Amino acid sequence: MGVVLAYTLAVALFCSFGNAQVTLVPAIITFGDSVVDVGNNDYIHTIFKANYPPYGRDFKNQEATGRFCNGKLATDITAENLGFTSYPPAYLSPQASGKNLLLGSNFASAGAGYDEHTSLLSHVIPLSQQLEYYKEYQGKLAKVAGSKKAASIIKDALYLVSAGSSDFIQNYYVNPFLNKAYTPDQYSSYLVSSFTSFVKSLYGLGARRIGVTSLPPLGCLPAARTIFGFHESGCVSRINTDAQQFNKKINSAATQLQKQLPDVKIVVFDVFKPLYDLVANPKKNGFTEATRGCCGTGTVETTSLLCNPKSYGTCTNASQYVFWDSVHPSQAANQILADSLIIQGISLIG
Ligand SMILES: *[C@@H]1O[C@H](CO)[C@@H](O)[C@H](O)[C@H]1NC(C)=O
């Protein structure tokens, strides 16, 4: 954990009384894809689900909550670092009611993208619908908290957005209608324009502290190596280049938004570098395997389809693996990513 954060936390905790939960932001509101979904897809009809073992085998009570991980997501760890003792619930779950809504809510849906078609192809919840649910949430929050407190929660909450990976992996690269019609660069511009309108809508609904993840090194995901990497031994460099181009564009879009929208704070979290470093130097970080996922790595890898109770050869100790399945980092890797996120995001919680 960052020194600055440790200090801030110490001050916050010092100022607390009794055992009431003391947090550095009142609530966390999350949108996006499987990197941050805490179980919304459990409640919809899609193949993109993670609510069965061995998902969650290192989570509290070994529960497969719908998180695409063996344990905690990076954003779960971030919530803990900010002082939360329980996680903002998946909006579609029964837990998203009453006082639990005061912690925020999670609207993310594994498989969702900035391109609405990406979400529709996978039958998951598009960002537009996630925003509709968020509006509905605001109404419920006002009933639970009263309109004045609800307004202050909405203004001071931390908003997290994670998308883009599914647009490339599940849509662009495998969809000839897209990849014959658009270059990766053109498609990135399209995705980033969608990001910009999403942030403007979110701002219009009251968000002021917004953190958005960059793309990870998509070419280093075990699935990308298997499906797209037959000529290469390491990461698929063309795919990493596309991810980096996208990241440049989303960074300049965020800078523009920061100038245009009064009183907003926007941070683009660089996920590319910390994850790339883990893959490039696994041993330095205590990992033994960075090319294959712990679960469901086969000849043709499809996340969640091949990580299931019958997956052949699932590793016994996921903390030695950078990747839990063929697309998603392990809890051990998420811990390192979360340490990096909190340092990068310090201006959002100040
Ligand atoms: C799993 O691996 C980690 C990291 O190498 C190690 O610290 C831990 O003791 C291992 N756990 C088990 C149960 O072997």
Image (cartoon, helix red, strand yellow):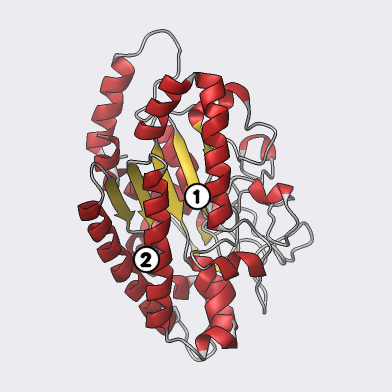
Image quadrant assignment for residue 249? bottom left
Neighbourhood count class around disc 1 (C-alpha, 10 Å): few under 14, some 14–19, many 20 upward: many
Whether residue 311 is situated above or below residue 232 in the rendered picture: above
- Residue bearing the label numbered 2: 281
Residue 108 place in picture, x, y as percent: 56, 50
Residue 327 place in picture, x, y as percent: 56, 65
Q: Give the label on residue 31, or none.
A: 1
* Residue at 33%, 54% in the rendered image: 269
Mark 2 lies within 8 Å of ligand 1 (Cβ measured):
no
Q: Is residue 106 visible?
A: no
* Residue at 34%, 28% in the rendered image: 24
Residue at the outermost top position: 18
Q: Is residue 124 visible?
A: yes
| Viewer-side label of 2, 1 | 1
* Residue at 62%, 35% in the rendered image: 60
Residue 61 place in picture, x, y as percent: 68, 34
Whether residue 306 is situated above or below residue 128 in the rendered picture: below
